[in-house]
Amino acid sequence: MKLKEKNVLITGAAQGIGKSIAFAMAKQGANITIADTNLEKAGITAQEIQALGVKGLAIKLDVSNPDDVASAFGTFMNEFGRLDILVNNAGITRDALLLRMKSVDWDAVLNINLKGTFLCSKEAVRLMSKKHYGKIISISSVVAFTGNPGQASYSASKAGIVGLTKTIAKEYAGRGIRANAVAPGFIQTAMTDAISEKVRDQMKSSIPLGTFGTTEDVANAVVFLGSEESDYITGQVLHINGGMYM
Ligand code: NAP
């Protein structure tokens, strides 16, 4: 059990990659809080987590809203009393070529992906500093490093997460806090399932390992970064992309 009795809060974990992370961490003994805009789905995931013999809690949270974030971390602390690991996973896309990108969509992506990571990390650092221990793991993306047509806002938000992560790592290493990011490439989710087979084949041809990753591939990396096995790692980005960017 790599995460026995660790208290973990994961944003946007009602489904997708966050849900896989929640299960992988719960299987390693962690108590999991699913903080998501969709409380109903978060509640179902939390119940499934409880079936693994650990605590599972669902909290309604919009990561881009400072009051919501303060209240969600308050609820979490009332239940668990100590935060060991924060996973900043909540993220959205509003894709369009730059000249067609609406400023309202730019704001939505930056507010949820980057400002949300800032707000949650700030709460986490405040709590973890007092205990001189904690791990913050944020989900970036390969496009933070490569760029991607149609994804100016998304790639900028995910690149911002890298700068934020490195800065937190430097500012709070002395308080025992590690901050790292993972940068997934193409991961098989409902999003990639919706793409035509032709385009999927083109995408796969850009991946040396020849397949999309799975949500479990990302979750395994997050478990590692949350565990003591990675205690000497901070300010890093772990790339999970089958070799498409190296
Ligand atoms: P997903 O299936 O869309 O799940 C994202 C979850 O976040 C949803 O449950 C969503 O709830 C929730 N969410 C959205 N806005 C939120 C907010 N303001 N506050 C709290 N929760 C919110 O996405 P995914 O594919 O699992 O992606 C998870 C993370 O990995 C994201 O950060 C994404 O950018 C990153 N990533 C994904 C891929 C990929 O190939 N899928 C690749 C690289 C990086 P609602 O359903 O209510 O909107």
Image (tube, rainbow, N blue to C red):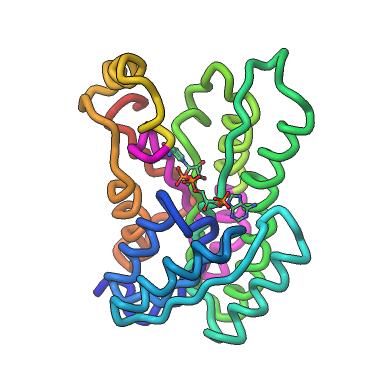
Q: Where residue 75 sits in the image (x, y, percent)?
A: 64, 79
Q: Where residue 152 sits in the image (x, y, percent)?
A: 63, 24
**Residue 120 occupies which quadrant of the picture?**
bottom right
Residue at 72% x, 65% y is 68
Residue at 29% x, 76% y is 52
- State which quarter of the image contains the N terminus: bottom left
**Residue 93 occupies which quadrant of the picture?**
top right
Q: Which residues are magenta?
A: 165-190
Residue at 71% x, 45% y is 111
Horizontal side of residue 1 vs 71, given as left or right: left
Residue at 33% x, 71% y is 26
Q: Is residue 188 magenta?
A: yes
Camera-side residue of 196 and 171: 196
The extreme left residue here reads 209
Q: Is residue 197 shown above or below 131?
A: above
Q: Is residue 148 magenta?
A: no
Q: Where residue 117 sits in the image (x, y, percent)?
A: 62, 52
Horizontal side of residue 6 vs 149, given as left or right: left
Horizontal side of residue 72 vs 12, given as left or right: right
